[in-house]
Amino acid sequence: MQTKLDEAKAELLARAARVAEHSPAGGVLPTGAEQGRRPDPDTTLAYLQRYYLHTAPEDLVDRDPVDVFGAALSHYRLAENRPQGTANVRVHTPTVEENGWTSSHSVVEVVTDDMPFLVDSVTNELSRQGRGIHVVIHPQVVVRRDVTGKLIEILGPDCDAHGPRTARPHDALVESWIHVEIDRETDRADLKQINADLLRVLSDVREAVEDWEKMRDTALRIADGLPDEPAAPDLHEYEPEEARELLRWLADDHFTFLGYREYNLVDGDALAAVPGTGLGILRSDPRHDSREDAHPVSPSFNRLPADARAKAREHRLLVLTKANSRATVHRPSYLDYVGVKKFDAEGNVVGERRFLGLFSSAAYTESVRRVPVIRRKVAEVLEGAGFSPSSHDGRDLLQILETYPRDELFQTPVDKLREIVTSVLYLQERRRLRLYLRQDEYGRYYSALVYLPRDRFTTGVRLRLMDILRDELGGTSVDFTAWNTESILSRIHFVVRVPQGTELPALTDSDVERLEGRLVEAARSWADGFGEALTAELGEERAAELLRKYGGSFPEGYKADHTARMAVSDLVHLERLDASDRDFALSLYEPVGAGPGERRFKIYRTGDQVSLSAVLPVLQRLGVEVTDERPYELRRSDRTSAWIYDFGLRMPVSGTGDAYLGDDARERFQDAFAAVWRGDAENDNFNTLVLGAGLTWRQAVVLRAYAKYLRQAGSTFSQDYMEDTLRNNVHTTRLLVSLFEARMSPGRQAAGTELVDAMLEELDGALDQVASLDEDRILRSFLTLIKATLRTNFFQLNAAGEQHSYVSMKFDPQAIPELPAPRPAFEIWVYSPRVEGVHLRFGKVARGGLRWSDRREDFRTEILGLVKAQMVKNTVIVPVGAKGGFVAKNLPDPSVDRDAWLAEGVAAYKIFISALLDITDNMVGGEVVPPKGVVRHDEDDTYLVVAADKGTATFSDIANGVAESYGFWLGDAFASGGSAGYDHKGMGITARGAWESVKRHFRELGHDTQNQDFTVVGVGDMSGDVFGNGMLLSEHIRLVAAFDHRHIFIDPNPDAAVSYAERRRLFELPRSSWADYNTELLSPGGGVHPRSAKSIPVNAQMREALGIEAGVTKMTPAELMQAVLHAPVDLLWNGGIGTYVKAASETHAEVGDKANDAIRVNGADVRAKVIGEGGNLGLTQLGRIEFARSGAGGGGGRVNTDAIDNSAGVDTSDHEVNIKILLNAVVADGDMTVKQRNALLAEMTDEVGTLVLRNNYAQNTALANGSAQAHSLLHAQQRFMRRLEQAGQLDRSLEFLPADRHIRELLGGGSGLTQPELAVLLAYTKITVADELIHTQLPDDPYLRRLLDAYFPAPLRARFPEQIASHALRREIITTLLVNDTVNTGGSTFLHRLREETGASTEEIVRAQLAAREIFGLAEVWDAVEALDNVVAADVQTRVRLHSRRLVERGTRWLLNNRPQPLQITETIELFQERVTRVWEELPKLVRGADLEWYQLVMDELTGEGVPVELAAKVAGFSSAFPTLDIVAISDRTGVDPLGVAEVYYDLADRLEITQLMDRIIELPRGDRWQSMARASIREDLFAAHAALTADVLAAGGGDATPEERFKAWEETNAAIISRARTTLDEIRGSDDFDLANLSVAMRTMRSLLRAHA
């Protein structure tokens, strides 16, 4: 019955036959077809079926039909020509390219006459050579050949080889065709050698088979002739007959005859072959020596020792032994040697008849009592032992002999045999090992019979016994056969071959006993040894317990590799694991007899297995070579598993030959492996330093941390290169680590600086020896970082007394030249295998968010870019800019398990926060408390606050929890926005702050966003804080389009009210996307489209709303989003994450936001009129500048910077932090509970929001004022930027501020800086001024306490004035508010210009400016102006503010020039304020002439623009109000009432036309610094002269005189000089133009009036 495999085989052969139809070779297959014609398919199929008849289907079914046919065809081609009596052999590796078919193995093909032993002999030879055999195909083929051996035909099945001979033609031949597939071999020399060896073996087979009958007949002939041959007289009488019987027995199919030859005994002991007597494999005569008398001696006999050769003359008829060579025919056993000696008439041995062959299987199974020679020995043994064959012992002894190795029975003398078998008889039931050793009488081998308990007979035991025998007996090879007896013993028969010619030593009984002892030890039960060792090590009770648990646990492989004592040691490790919470243990050990550098390493594991692929990389990166691995599973009785992994290691050696394998190398290695395995250390080549440089794994962590930082800092060298460099410079590496420890370890500080200095000196010398420039640079970079390290937690212990799993280092960035600009003031680097992070601070009091970055390779670059914006943003708050970022390195796939992903992110965040706090000073009771275990190389540093950022928006409570666990003085003020803080989204504060910018931009366009509709496109969705809140800040928003990372929203012609209501609905959902928008409310053509769509249809309404070209009917999502950004709308509102606008000059790669490359547009192409930046980094700075200059359709759009627009978020957080600092102190004093504090915080939410938005409004106002003066102040701005650059405080290229060449172009074109550029300059002004003022006494001025109060909400001012006054950051708060007020009101170049003009310090100028503002009461004016938003035009408001700025500037200058410095603010204000106000109130009555005309002109102009009369009157008096300072000063000196002085002052101005002269001075050019200073100087001189003349005129009249009377009296006194002066002044006034020359003359003329009086 055919199986499925048989059917598959038949189908395959049929397909192979069809291959022949298309094969050119198919036509020459001699399968019965007429020669030269293609056979029919049936005939070919019949051939293939015959060829593969006895081939197993499973050997064929997976093969290609082409290969099946190709193999059969190839064999046929080999058989095409075979001369009679020869064998054809081919060994090749077929390929398609060369043979048209292929095989995965090499192929051996044989064609020869059919005869016995062919397949066995061929396969035995291949196996002897170590060639693996995969398939054997052996068809017997009946063929016809011509006389030359050419193949005529292959006969069909009717001429079967096994059928009767008569059924075949007379010339038919039966042939063996053998196809063997062996291990693939492509070396042609090897294939050729195999071919030659097989031809030799086939020759032996042919010779043996051809001569077999002759050899058998020879044996019988000798047997018949023995009685008639001469014999030695001393032969035993049984020998001739026994020899005859043996020869006949052999001929009776008990012996496979393979060779025969006769030898004569010559030259003493030499046996010489008799020519022509050889048969079988001995057919060929040995080669004769060239000497005539020489005889061809037996080479194998001649190699025997002399005493063995002497046995040739012994009077013994039969020689029964083993030959020295293995059979090449039939089976690969050593040849059996049967020799029959020849004697001469005197009884001397004269020769030998030698038979070589193999005893047949029948010879081994026949009873010993029927085998000639053996049966006599058996009888003698029984008789000698004294046992009757029928007795019990006799039967047992006979059974032992029946199973005794048959070869041994032939060869062992009777006495030796009796001694052995009787001993075995008594051994039968004893569990012990016995050795019976016999030397071959010819000295060629030892025969060793070993009896041992059956349960101890394993492969491992057998191999150990073989090794011992080989070692002890000097053997070259050991063969064995095994036999299990009926008793409890097993028997192994070993034959130990020794080198030919070796003279075997005589073995004494003690030698045999010693050898037996070694065998006993080797075969000893491992379990027995284990039990004994366990008891000895752990005591009987514990040993018994563990034996029950582990008795059967150790696998055989383990037992073969390890001693029982070693098992006890391993078991102790496993038991310790069970008693602890660890799941692995380690042991590095040096095995007995290990070579140099060789070690073994064990991993003990409970629970899950260890993956080899996980272990090997760890070991390799520790610098060791893994030579082998042996895993063992221990299945314990409690059904748990334990694992032991044993690795062979080769330890590293340094270039000098010294590896750091000192006494502690074992602990260092194990600790390092454990650290990597636990995840405490990363698996990289820094670990090679543990053995290669003698470092601990934690010391390697230090170097790894520094290397990781260098990569983040922009080092061009890869980590691999750094690792190689440290490994190549071991001495320097060790010095670097020692220097780190000397500087930073608390335990090393007692040595003082001498130790560090000495190390630095040694390091300098070591670095000088480094040959490679690159390696020198790398090593010096490490040195620089170590020297720049201010603090580290590396030596700090946690609450559990353990070292941290992470490292934090505080750097002085100014000491690291390689860092990219800008360099922060302080930097903390955090490294661990789980997280890396950086925190950049630009001052001691600094603040910024912590970002969960996804930019693992360059997150420091990302954070550095963000902190630049943060610096600008923080100008409105107390702390300067800071920014932190971290990457979680072991995040799970969020698409698989988002909860696990988030949990790992939170864990990484906690590590990062902890690392920062570890090295930050605390404050307890107002005293600074340094962190424990930290060496500080810097000053006290207690202020560390953080905030939320991308990825950490909800982490504030987590951060505060960590801070509180540290007892950090800020408590939950550490991270703002937590559950007890201000909810930015709930307040909508970031969006509201940015909306102040939007409202300001639109006011300047004459549009009121809160009362007039306007169109908007945006980035974001309603679930987002900034976008969602922003799109609800006006009910007049008409949102035309928006997109986020999921959808594109289009509403071409929205209804403002309807869309507002729907947006609010979405915003109030717990989660929402644009997909939740009710599309029924969309205008025609609207829709919500997924960004994953292949394309999006574009309709007419969309084309019109987004300004898309006619004819466009569909767009990809990216193209549509670009169209949204290009849309001709009023506002582009960015509330998303990403950078969407760049400059044409920038590449996408430079932007660094790859995710949005396909969407991003150029600033010039944005057609929106206004851009509001609620989100960070929505535009590049160059993109903003381009938009401001040429966006919005080409005329330039309105935009600030993200730092200006969205600063309200950080401002709110800063208020929260500082309020919490205040209230936490109250809570700590017991005057308030935390619950009450939280309630008060919530109560103040709205007021905090109002305080924050004031800053947004003020900064926008300042920028509007700056834009109005952009061209006129460009020279001053240029000088200011130069000064900042010279001081190292500004890099223009980094901030994208124009270079001098560009400024010249702007001046020539009549333009100035754009608002984004002005925003940067404004920020730098505030940053630098704040840095200067904080180090002065100004923040401590009592007058400024009002600023501190104004910072806090009213409830705090009312309830906690003392706590406000003692606030920890009171100086910083005052400085921040003062700088903001000063710069916002004075402009970004005000302080710089005043410094240039007066030479005063920044502190002096700020004091004077504050006093001037207070004296003139301008706060009320500015409040009145602000109230006119959307009432009067924005440019009118700006004009008023610039008028007031000019007044303050003049007042500041006057105070600097005329009052003692530094100015006492309170006293100065008290001196001037009330009297200036009195004069100001009377100005309309006091001014006359040109001043009155100007007053009235301004008054009319402002009221005409809608400015209230009261405010207009105030502003109209600005020009005339400035002299009130002089008026009050004169009043103070003269004692005259200020109004009296004022009357004279303004009267004199009119009479001398001083106002007209002042107008001419103001018109002077100020193209450069010197023109400006000259203009200011003349102006100040004129004011001074005017004041002095006023004093003169006041002195001329009586006490009650009117101004007219006083002037007349003064004029009469100085008539002549006044007359000349008037003439000169009239002439100058009549000039066509005015310049510095004629105005200087005018000033000299004015001064002459004073000299005349003097």
Image (cartoon, helix red, strand yellow):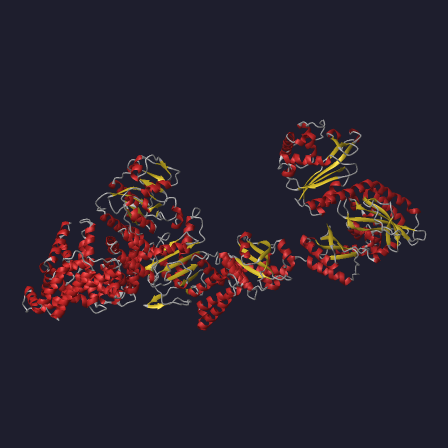
Residue 632 image offset from top left, x and y in percent: 59, 54
Q: On the image, which quarter does residue 1290 sit in?
A: bottom left
Up/down of 158 relative to 116, above or below: above
Q: Is residue 1297 visible?
A: no
* Residue toward you, 1215 or 493: 1215
* Residue toward you, 82 or 1211: 82
Q: Is residue 1302 visible?
A: yes
Q: Quadrant of the N terminus?
A: top right
* Residue toward you, 101 or 901: 101
Q: Quadrant of the C terminus?
A: bottom left
Give the side of residue 22 with respect to residue 1380, left or right. right
Residue 1048 image offset from top left, x and y in percent: 34, 41
Q: On the image, which quarter does residue 211 sit in?
A: top right
Q: Residue furthest right?
A: 345
Q: Residue at x 28, y 49 (%)?
A: 1199
How many numbered marks are there? 0
Up/down of 914 relative to 392, above or below: below
Give the side of residue 842 with respect to residue 177, left or right. left
Residue 274 image offset from top left, x and y in percent: 87, 48
Up/down of 457 relative to 86, above or below: below
* Residue toward you, 1310 or 554: 1310
Residue 1463 image offset from top left, x and y in percent: 22, 68
